[in-house]
Image (spheres, grey):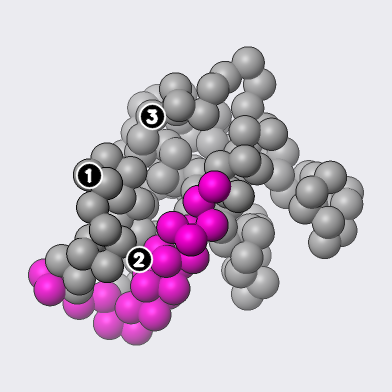
Amino acid sequence: MNRTQAREWLVKLLYQFDVSKSEPPDILNRFFESNDPEEEKDYIEKTFYGIVENVNNIDDRIKKYLKNWDINRIAKIDLAIIRCSFYEILYCDDIPNSVSINEAVEIAKKYSTEKSPSFINGILGSLVKDFNNNGDNYDN
């Protein structure tokens, strides 16, 4: 499994977490029972738990970039994609922002609606623009 496939699985796990309200360890254990992510296991596990543990902070930051839109109206799959990319941008120093955004857009093209890729790209682009303008201070 490569990193692109790992991100796709991660989005599916986040979607399942949001929709099923199952416990995160149960979701991850079921995934690992039927899938072998090989060298991407640590990435999937670390990122999944990182997003779950920081979901309120991530969602608060997402809300900042929604223009005339409520986070509860975002399609669950789109929200999973955005959360994954926000987490990578905010918490993972080893993943270039452009890679995270590009992967999110490609996943949206594959799993979501026709309008979702540009919607997701706009939100993520705004986050990165703020980051570039404000350095390490994500609160601005």
Residue 123: x percent and y percent? 62, 36
Prevailing SS of the magenta stretch: helix
User: What range of the chain is rendered magenta?
Assistant: 33-56
Give the vertical position of 62 relative to 85 (above or below). above
Residue positioned 65% across, 59% down in the render: 90
Graded by Cα atoms within 10 Å as few (under 14), some (14 to 19) or many (20 or more), the crowding at tag 1 reads few
Q: Residue at x 23, y 52 (%)?
A: 22
Q: Give amino acid for label 1.
A: Ser
User: Horizontally, is 43 left or right of 89 in the view?
Assistant: left
| Nearer-the-camera pick, 23 or 120 | 23
Q: Which residue is mark 2?
A: 6
Closer to viewer: mark 2 or mark 3: 3
67 in the magenta segment: no
Please provide percent x and percent y for residue 121. Answer: 58, 38
Would residue 64 be found to the left or right of residue 84 on screen?
right
Q: Nearer the viewer, residue 118 or 133?
A: 133
Could you say whether the residue bearing mark 2 is in a helix, strand or loop? Answer: helix
According to the picture, the residue beneath numbered tag 1 turns out to be: 20
> Of tags 3 and 1, which is closer to the observer?
1
**Residue 40 appears anywhere in the view:** no
> Are discs 2 and 3 less than 8 Å apart at CB?
no
CA distance for labels 3 and 1: 15 Å
First along the sequence among labels 2 and 3: 2
Q: Kindly indicate the quadrant of the structure image that contains residue 40.
A: bottom left
Q: Residue at x 61, y 69 (%)?
A: 92
